[in-house]
Image: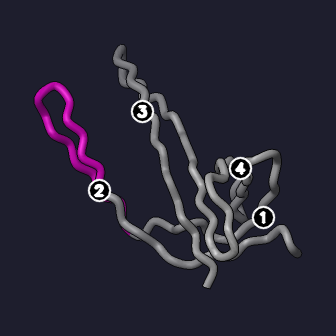
Amino acid sequence: NPNEYVSTGAFSVTLICMALGQTFEQTSDDISILGDGTWRLENNVLFLKDDGNEDEVGAEIIELSNGNLQLRIEETEVFQDNSISTSTTITVDMILERL
């Protein structure tokens, strides 16, 4: 099927946050690059849906050339803890290279 993707690889991320004079650090290891799934294109947005996952992720196409695809994914998360609410916007710039 031409609208299926397969990817391999993983990475680790260490997030460091400073708030109210305290430093918090969290490391996540072995994060999958994309996994396997299906895709669709709408305007300048590439929508990806991993196999076994109901959610679809939209990635803006920044650049598309013969062997490279550069994507940007923005996600805002709201955290609620008792009466305190914070929001964080995460921007991921991803460059995929055809081998």
Q: Are marks 4 and 3 in contact (CB under 8 Å)?
A: no
Q: Residue furthest right?
A: 1
Q: Position of residue 68 (x, y in %)?
A: 62, 70
Which label was assigned to residue 38?
1
Amino acid, disc 2: Thr
- The residue located at (72%, 65%) in the rendering is 51
Taking the spot 82% from the left edge, 48% from the top edge, the residue there is 42
Q: Residue at position x 78%, y 61% from top?
A: 39
Mark 3 is on which residue type? Thr
Q: How much space separates mark 4 and mark 3, taking CA atoms?
A: 20 Å
Secondary element under disc 3, as helix, strand or loop, is strand
Determine which residue is flagged by label 2: 14
Answer with the quarter of the image where residue 29 lies.
Answer: bottom left
Q: Spatial distance from mark 2 to mark 3, Cα to Cα?
A: 16 Å
- Magenta span: predominant SS is strand
94 sits left or right of 44 in the view: left
Q: Quadrant of residue 34?
A: bottom right
Residue wearing tag 3: 88
Q: Point out the tag, 4 or 3, that comes first from the N-terminus.
A: 4
Residue located 62% across and 52% down the image: 62
Mark closest to the chain's N terminus, 4 or 2: 2
Which of 38/74 is in front? 74
The spot of residue 57 in percent (x, y) is: 67, 49
- Element on which disc 1 rests: strand
Q: How many marks?
A: 4
Q: Which residues are magenta?
A: 15-29
Residue on which the image places disc 4: 56
How far apart marks 4 and 1 lie (CA) works out to 10 Å
- The earlier-in-sequence mark between 4 and 1 is 1
| SS at mark 4 in the image | loop
